[in-house]
Amino acid sequence: MTRKKNSAGKIIVALLALLWLVIAGAPFYFMVISAFKEQFEILTTGVFSIPKGFYMDNFAGVIKSQFYKYLLNSTFVVIVSLVLILVTALCAAYPFSRFKFKLNKPLFGLVVAAMAVPIHVTLIPIFQLTQKIHLYDTIYALIGPYTAFNLPISVFILTSFMAEIPKELEESAEIDGCGKYRTFFHIIAPLSKAGLATLAIYNAVNMWNEFSFALVLTQSAKSRTLPLSIWDFQGQYNSNVPMIMAVLTFCALPMIVAFAIGQDKLIKGMMAGAVKG
């Protein structure tokens, strides 16, 4: 009976996983095959039908446009913001998780409270601040908000992750003569790689797809990011659905590749804090 129950459970899980794959994969499949169709072919054939011929002019048109500028801007902003987030979160999470001092809980409470601040409430103050410091309509205007709004949850997650690292490792390091700084750089930071990888992928996806700040703080094409390229292409090629699908495919591809490369580290990082010791 136990084996039959286990087999039935595995079959149910497999069916649910297959159902989820279909639900999650259908939009992506539609996006990719539509990008290879001609402008009016999508109207005369089935939604999920295979293209009659792989029409590459849609992708060529995207490449010949200013798409590469949007791509470079997004890549630069995400990389710089991500480095600032990870370094700051790593330095902040260490004392929160390993040191006992009077302001530990109040300061950590402020970090948690900052997670509840709605992004859209700050758009006008940040817009005004950006104009005063002469960063409006530059890609540098996005780095500050991206870092600030992704930092609280990064500190919160990394603090919980570091708290699970055995204290015996630090005690052994102190016996060997390691100070706090050497312990941090040689023990805590290397053991936090899984957590940092999880935060890197999570934050990178959020910043890659961010639209509100990019729309408010930039104006010209030289400073805009990929989500705005989709918006611009949609206005320019409103009736050309395959062209828009080609842009969406290009925008989604970098994050899909990054997730495929780092999915094992992402899963390890998510599971690392679930088991003590």
Image (cartoon, rainbow, N blue to C red):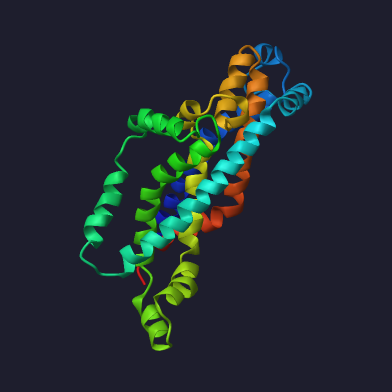
Q: Nearer the viewer, residue 218 or 4?
A: 218
Q: Which corner quadrant of the image does residue 126 belong to?
A: top left
Q: Which corner quadrant of the image does residue 100 belong to?
A: bottom left
Relative to residue 62, is residue 73 drawn left or right? left
Quadrant in the picture for the C terminus: bottom left
Which residue shows up at 27% across the image and 56% down it? 108
Residue 15 placed where, x, y %? 49, 42
Q: Which corner quadrant of the image does residue 58 belong to?
A: top right
Residue 274 placed where, x, y %? 37, 61
Quadrant in the picture for the N terminus: bottom left
Which residue shows up at 24% across the image and 53% down it? 109
Q: Nearer the viewer, residue 155 or 7?
A: 155
Relative to residue 14, is residue 167 drawn left or right? left
Q: In the rendered image, is residue 20 in sight?
A: no
Which residue shows up at 40% across the image and 44% down it? 148
- In this rendering, the answer to whether 274 lies above or below 29 is below
